[in-house]
Image (spheres, rainbow, N blue to C red):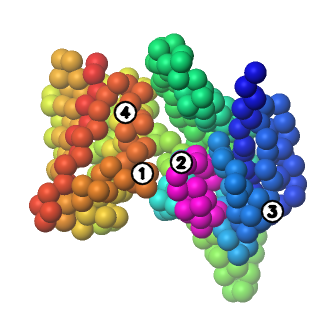
Amino acid sequence: MPKKYIPNILIVDDQESNLLYLEIILRDLDAKVIKAMSGKEALSKIKGYELALAVLDLQMPEIDGFELAQLIKKQKKNHLVPIILLTAHYSEQKYILKGYESGAIDFLTKPIEKSILLNKIKIFLELDRQKHQILNDKLKLKKTEKALIKSEEELRAYAIYFDTKVEEEKKMIAAEVHDGLGQLFTILKMDLLWMKKKVPPKNIQINEKFDSMRDIIDSGVKKVQEISGQLRPGMLDDLGLLSTIQSELSKFQERTDIKCRVDFEPLDFQVDFEMSTSLYRIFLEALINIYRHSGATSIKINLTNREDELLLRMEDNGKGIPKEKINSNLSFGLIGMRERVKIWNGTVEILGKKGKGTTITVRIPI
């Protein structure tokens, strides 16, 4: 009787309490957990082991999560290791992009929602088990192929469900942050202004302190608005995908001086909630890639609602993406775009011409 396969999961965090929390989350999984409190210890412990998954804390001394992800990829160059990065501090878009570029496939902010992390881990463990089943049981290849097709359909359905739930959660959190903290700041400012009225104008030092505190509150309100927008742009729910794209392009053009032109065919149409979310995230990822890598001075965007498909085309006049980058396993932004469109049975085509720019074409059947 063949030996039962037990997948290995690496968890790394320099805080013992965080490691214990991750252990508790993973304790009911049929997997071996390899623990480490530093990048150096982790690299030593995983020598000779095949990893089904690595969950890494981002902020660690000596070797941080970004560098450790790259070192794991280098050590396990013949085996693709899914890596999830965890952070309590680096939630800005630039750090998320850096995480994907370092080799991660997902990026979660602390405090970690147990059910979200556990569901993600279960998916990767299931994919890992299926891979080993294929390798170890060639005699059942046809049956396995059918199981994989079914599994892919289930994963696609789950991906749609999961993305929808995540966006709904972001929407709820954004509303709570905007309304809850926004109201608290407003009340605090009202009380501060009331107190200021009780102070004689001649008391310059105290009045200056009041003004400084008011400015801090105003900055807090602005930050709340920014965080809410990053979690989930309210315009996407209120006015739809087309208006949100126009708004994002307007802000992008203002910040980068890259000229943007957008055309919709027809001029106005609606896209359902789940699909509009996927298209918006793909559009945003493409926009960031153009800014970071293309050196472009202009972008043309066309979103067409045909009878049988939605077509999103983005063209820039930059240096043109090299062919090896398009198919690289390290181009995680492009991989993410393909994965998002895959759940809709869609396709992403990327074409770069040296010195003449890059064209990204997304097709989603409807």
Q: Are marks 1 and 4 in contact (CB under 8 Å)?
A: no
Q: Earlier in the sequence, mark 3 or mark 2?
A: 3
Amino acid type at circle 4 is: Val
Q: Secondary structure at mark 4?
A: helix
Q: Are marks 3 and 1 in contact (CB under 8 Å)?
A: no
Amino acid type at circle 1 is: Asn
Q: Are marks 4 and 2 in contact (CB under 8 Å)?
A: no
Q: What's drawn in magenta, residue-wise?
A: 65-85
Estimate the spatial distance between the alpha carbons at disc 3 and disc 4, rounded to whole Å. Answer: 37 Å
Q: Residue at x 76, y 21 (%)?
A: 1
Can you give x and y, in whole percent of width and height, for residue 309 in the image? 23, 23
Give the class, few, some or many, for how many residues have Cα within 10 Å of label 3's Cα (few <14, many ≥20): some
Label placed on residue 31:
none
Label placed on residue 341:
4
Q: Which quadrant is home to the C terminus? A: top left
Estimate the spatial distance between the alpha carbons at disc 3 and disc 1, rounded to whole Å. Answer: 28 Å
Label placed on residue 80:
2
The residue that mark 3 highlights is: 37
Q: Residue at x 79, y 50 (%)?
A: 34
